[in-house]
Amino acid sequence: MAFFKKDNFKRDAIIGLIVWIFLLIFFFVIPSPGIHDIIQKVFILGLFALSLNILIGYLGLVAFGHAAFFAAGAYTLGLFLQSSIVSNLGSLSIPAAIISAIFISTILAAFIGAICIRLKDIYFSFLTLAFQMLIYSIILALVDITGGDQGLMGGFPKPPFLGIDLGKPFDFYAFTIFISIITIVLLRQLIESPFGYGLRMIRDNPDRPAALGFNNQRHKLIAFIIAGSIAGLAGSLQALLDVGAYPEWAFWAKSAEPLFMILLGGMHSFLGPLMGAFIFEILNDFVTANTRYYGLVLGLVILSFVLGLRRGLLDWLLIKFYRK
């Protein structure tokens, strides 16, 4: 079967292009570095949350250790760009570093996923957490390579490539959003493909697709690998934004962030996690600037969504105004 429907891909690609152009114009209309930074973070965190929602929203598997792949992508890119090998790649160093980050995250996800998908429910969740904490411990232990608890020190170069200089705010802004939109469009095609509907079938009734000839374990593993690779891409973009990588990105608390975003935005609408990332980042920016009690405010907001709306905001809006 085809991976995507041509008409749907064309429609989503046009919408994505329009959004990208609009945000490029917005960069000059609102020349505020703080707002530009928030937009970049929303797209990066949105990719992170969308990747996790492949498992939660479409497969019904809650992973507590998803930040392992985010950190793997970040550290791979940072170490690649710090390496002397980069000097032989010249202007291809950043594209090669991003591809390497995705590749390492994919391999790591394949290894962890092959073990974790054998389990169900809470056992699956805590096994992913166990692997994440193992990776966190490795990052802390390999001080000479990773910088230990200080993270990658000294930054790394961002040489221009294909006429793009990520050292310039506009170039980085346009590049980050462009890569994010492309990934979102491709992920949309995956979710709406026969493979994506196969994941929904496994989520709703795993016995039925198995009876129809589906290889449930293979579908779960592929979904896990795709989720890990997109999280690795998000981590590499975050490393480029911060010009560093830190062990906190592999800690269990980091995995809670995309979970919160999914709860805030909604797990049953494709762009729900992206909306959740927007709400999460706005809360993070506003609350930290006005109070020390960030955790308390975030907890109250999540409780209001869970107890009041009983679903994420985008899920609630679609049900309220569209799916009547």
Image (tube, grey):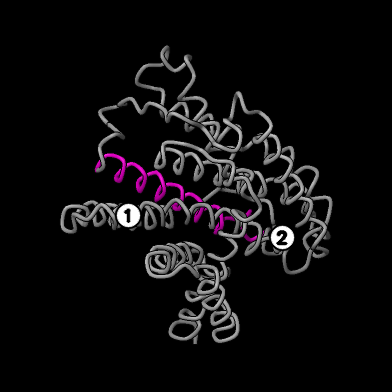
What's the amino acid at mark 1?
Answer: Ile
Q: Which badge, 2 or 1, is on the more N-terminal residue?
A: 1
Residue sitting at the far left: 29
Are there few (<14), some (14-19), or many (20+) residues within 10 Å of tag 2?
many
On the image, the x and y values in percent for residue 175 come to: 33, 41
Give the residue displayed 58% in from the left and 32% down from the top: 103
In this view, 264 is above or below 224: below
The residue that appears at 58% across and 46% down in the rendered structure is 248
Q: Amino acid at mark 2?
A: Leu
- Residue 147 to residue 284: above or below: above
Image position, residue 194 (x, y; %): 61, 56
- Toward which corner of the image does residue 304 lie, by quadrant? bottom right
| Residue highlighted by disc 1 | 14
Residue under label 2: 61
Q: Nearer the viewer, residue 235 or 293?
A: 293
> For the residue labelled by badge 2, is the local secondary structure a helix, a strand or a loop?
loop
In the image, which disc is placed on residue 204? none
Q: Which stretch appears magenta? A: 170-198
Q: Position of residue 149 (x, y in %)?
A: 60, 38
Q: Residue at x 29, y 27 (%)?
A: 162
Does 45 appear above or below 109? below
In terms of secondary structure, what is the magenta stretch mainly? helix
Residue at 16% across / 53% down in the picture?
A: 28
> In front here: 247 or 75?
247
